[in-house]
Amino acid sequence: MSKDRVLKLREAMQQKNVEALFVTSAINRRYLTGFTGSSGYCLITMNDAYLLTDFRYMTQASEQTKDFRVVEHGQRVMDTVKELLAAANVGKLAFEQDDVTFAAYSAYAEQLKPAELVPVSGLVEQLRIIKDAEELKVMQRAADLADATFKHILDFIKPGMTEREVDLEMEFFMRKNGATSSSFDTIVASGERSAMPHGVASGRVIAGNELITFDFGALLDGYCSDLTRTIAIGKPDPKLKEIYDIVLEAQLHAVANIKPGMTGREADALARDIIAKYGYGDQFGHSTGHGLGMEVHENPRLSKLSDDILKPGMVVTVEPGIYIPGLGGVRIEDDIVITETGNAVLTHSPKEYTVLPA
């Protein structure tokens, strides 16, 4: 796995005239090496691949990492990098500009002299956009766990509970069933708070005759799932059932028609045009979806401004919504993988209008 990824990375480096790359992003490091420790760096040249870490992780790194030379770095990591670059006769080192602070850059540049630091962006992230078969297996398991969590919470939730109590139960269930954690701060937004697209669980008490939106996911073996469902407790305002049906129509249409070769803008329009047709375009203020993988928000983007081209192996969310302040809102979301001919859905929780007793 790591060997193939390093080879692809070297191809990308050659295209950018990069002779050596210093990887500081923990997620990119894990993607390239499989190492899960909290401290470490990768140094990739055209001939060598190093995983640099400290004495605490030498055994773990050696056990988890193949095709990389594991090196215990000195007190200042750049002193070790400088030695390795000199041995390879490399005078310029590219670094991940989106991950390195200005303070770290300043220190690295001083310590690395006379070698030069060169900023680059997205070299590893561009590889991560296309998932391989092993990654998709893990992502399917993460999606399955999200589905199981939703099924569990429907049996658990009752009026009188707070949103945080529900959030805690969801987190406990996911971790008990193999997740490292949730993919992000779980959204449990009830009543008028369901009109908040990012209404993270609060102390609000869940009442009757209202909607509840759950937006959550499981971080499992390094990969995220991301699922949203909206349900009813009792008999909410009929207006909410109306917008539910519109969002469901838009979401189903988008999932049925997203395919490779589309731009993110075209995929976004599949859902957005339906919502706008019913007069709620102004109440759908976010994008239709985003890439998903080791991070919960990755490229590509399914938005009005996105020229990203969808390709087989990309995993994206499809999550249109309508939000009416003071009343409530609806969002429905699935994770899909782009295939050669269309897409395959990873999440399978029911989407019909679900009503629990008040």
Image: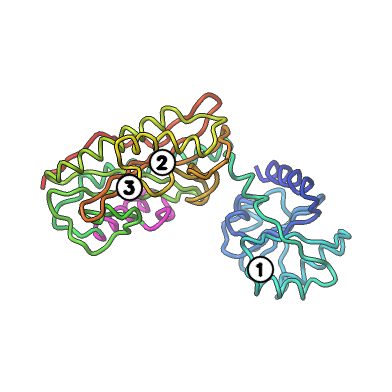
Tags 2 and 3 touching, CB below 8 Å: no
Q: Are marks 3 and 1 in contact (CB under 8 Å)?
A: no
Range of magenta residues: 164-185
Residue 316: % across, % down? 48, 40
Q: Which comes before the other along the chain, label 3 or label 1?
A: 1
**Residue 272: x percent and y percent?**
39, 38
Q: Is residue 225 above or below residue 96?
A: above
State the CA–CA distance, disc 2 to disc 1: 35 Å
- On the picture, is 306 further left or further right than 57? left
Which numbered circle lies on residue 54?
1
Residue 165 drawn in magenta? yes
Q: Residue furthest right?
A: 89
- For marks 2 and 3, give the CA distance: 28 Å
In the image, 58 versus 156, the foreground residue is: 156
Secondary element type, mark 2: helix
* Circle 3: element type: helix
Residue drawn at 48 percent across, 43 percent down: 304
Identify the element where label 1 is drawn.
loop
CA neighbours of label 3 inside 10 A, class few (<14), some (14 to 19), many (20+): some
Instruction: Please tell me how crowded label 1 is: few (under 14), some (14-19), or many (20+) other residues with Cα within 10 Å.
Output: some
Number of marks in the rendered image: 3
* Residue receiving disc 2: 143
In front: mark 2 or mark 3?
Answer: 3
Quadrant position of the N terminus in the picture: top right
Q: Amino acid at mark 3?
A: Gln
Mark 2: give few (<14), some (14-19) or many (20+) Cα within 10 Å.
Answer: many
Q: Nearest the camera: 35 or 7? A: 7
Circles 2, 1 touching at the beta carbon (< 8 Å)? no
> Counting residues from the N terminus, which is met first, the one under dot 2 or under dot 3?
2
Q: Residue at x 80, y 68 (%)?
A: 82
Residue annotated with mark 3: 283
Q: CA distance from mark 3 to mark 1?
A: 51 Å
